[in-house]
Amino acid sequence: MPKVMRSGLLAIGVLAALVGAAQGVPVQAEPGPAGHLDPRLPVAERVEDLLGRMSLDDKLGQMTQPERRYITPEEVTRYRIGSVLSGGGSAPTPNTPERWADMYDTFQRAALAGPLRVPLLYGVDAVHGHNTVVGATIFPHNIGLGATRSPALVREIGAATAREMAGTGMDWNFAPCVCVARDDRWGRTYESFGEVPELPAKMTTIIDGLQGDDLGGATSVLATAKHFVGDGGTADGDDRGDAKISEAELREVHLPPFRAAVERGVGSVMVSYSSWNGLKMHQNRYLITDVLKGELGFTGFVVSDYNGIDEIDGRPGFTRDEVAAAVNAGIDMVMVPIEWRRFIDYLREAVRDGDVPMSRIDDANRRILAKKVELGLFERPMADRAYLETVGGAEHRELARRAVARSQVLLKNDGVLPLDAEDKIFVAGGAAHDIGVQSGGWTITWQGEPGPITPGTTILEGIRGAAAAVDYDADGGGVDDSYDAAIAVVGEKPYAEHHGDLTGDMGLDAGDLKTIERLREAGVPVVVVLVSGRPLDIADELPGWDALLAAWLPGTEGAGVADVLFGEAEPTGRLPVTWMRDSAQQPINRGDGKTPLFPFGYGLTYG
Ligand code: BGC
Ligand code: BGC
């Protein structure tokens, strides 16, 4: 570079530093032209070059992940923030794909306005499609995908989700959850591909779909294996609870999906809120650093869960000690949605006092920056709006419909299924005509909610598309013996995380039972379609039903349920979890000697 240009840049750098100092904001170590911006250099070289230019404050910023509602773009520039997230339901107004792309670009421009021009990673929970965006394709929750037993299909879903994310700019998906749900009372059971380690391990193909062949692809997004480790093994299925299990069991049951994810090159791993034998995972250096990074050879970066560091000492909020404990345990990026300024201050103090070694800060930065380079973010930082049209596009909805059909598990059939397109059908039940209910939690909002929250095809609409004569009343009013069959679509209302934990009864509610009773009294064959995130306690009622189809939480493409009901698709789904005979059997799992209502792997065909 000509000397005059170089000195000009230096002058600008010095000026920026002076202005920065005058405002009392972090000052960069070494301004100047940058090898890290050179795409021809190898990843490691670019990262080292960049690291050499960074001040402590630059490095602290990279490790900080605020929530979009609690930080402005100006603050992103000023504090050299490394990542921003949208928490559950945190969306721009209006909630359209275009506004997401605009929001993303605004934050990204702010990051690039920093002196070292380091792009940020925008993270979001796209756990069953790009589910916070109104109009996106909503795929079945993982429990349904586990029932498909199809790693190839799951990979396709990952790729479709990545395309929809790419259109809105999103770089980083907090998915897949590779938890092994051992107790169905757990409110996150539906986030699990299944209760035995082989199943979530097999379904890590979703990582290949999300990340592409390598992270540099046009629609590649960074995937996250979560929640490390033992989240599905807590006592009584308590969310954020304590997994009171031996190391042998932890390794045998809960670790294998993480091993599989690391083998597939997953870019990040999220730590679990839960504890292992009384020790919070967020401070478990042995498991995060020795086992995950050492033994399994994970080279990506570790992110904490939302306010996860607050929980280490069991008191609300976080202290300097909790920050130091989390970072020393091996957490590289810290999800501190609101109190991110305090986090930066505490971490700076901890480093200055020698409580967190500088080598740990550098290691965290290397891991984060390497992923940014690999993603091509320095070269292509902005939303690729060419992919906006894929959001909720016909091809993706078609894929989702296929996935729904393949996820259906036929548990009972006294010969009434498949139904005939010429049949006169009555449909009832609170889950029959409700996109929100059939999508479950983590849909548009964190908890999800009933109602027409996003475009899609309800199960009723799917049935109407399959049969000529369909009548509907949510409560079953008007049913009589002129119908060939009655379908009751019943089950759980949306929930997420601990809000879905069950402590007592796991049965259908009184309203659903009454609706089914009405249909039965009409003297027509009754088909029950269960919309739920887990097995429900239905053993006592089952003898009165002519057919039972477990539909799980299918998402926006309810026609996939109808495809199976009417024989357009053969039921091929297999139980990804053991179906209890009675709530009191929880936890119940394959091979534990208990007698279930339906064993793991069960599923009828029309054959
Ligand atoms: C956020 C979610 C987050 C949850 C954790 C909510 O306010 O929106 O993203 O998972 O808090 O408690
Ligand atoms: C959940 C995570 C999620 C995070 C960000 C937490 O409450 O446990 O699964 O990725 O929020 O929304």
Image: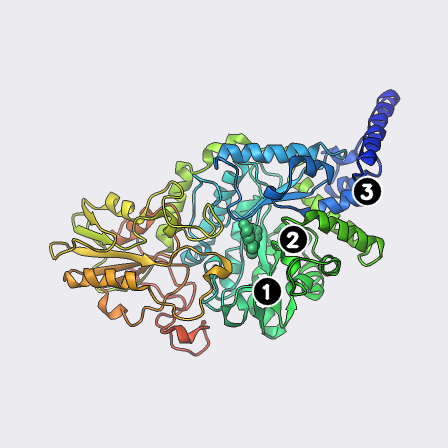
* Residue on which disc 3 sits: 55
Mark 3 or mark 1, earlier in chain: 3
Element at label 3: loop
Residue 50: % across, % down = 78, 40
Dividing the image into 4 quarters, which one contains the N terminus?
top right
Pick whichever of labels 3 and 2 is earlier in the sequence.
3
- Please tell me which residue lies in front, 428 or 424: 428
How many residues crowd around disc 2 within 10 Å: few (fewer than 14), some, or many (20 or more)? Answer: many
Question: Mark 3 is on which residue type?
Answer: Ser
The colour scheme applied to this rendered structure is rainbow
Under mark 1, the amino acid is Ser
User: Quadrant of the image for the C terminus?
Assistant: bottom left
Task: Tell me if residue 274 comes above or below residue 366 in the rendering.
Answer: below
As drawn, the label of residue 274 is 1
Is residue 188 visible to us here? no
Q: Which mark is residue 572?
A: none
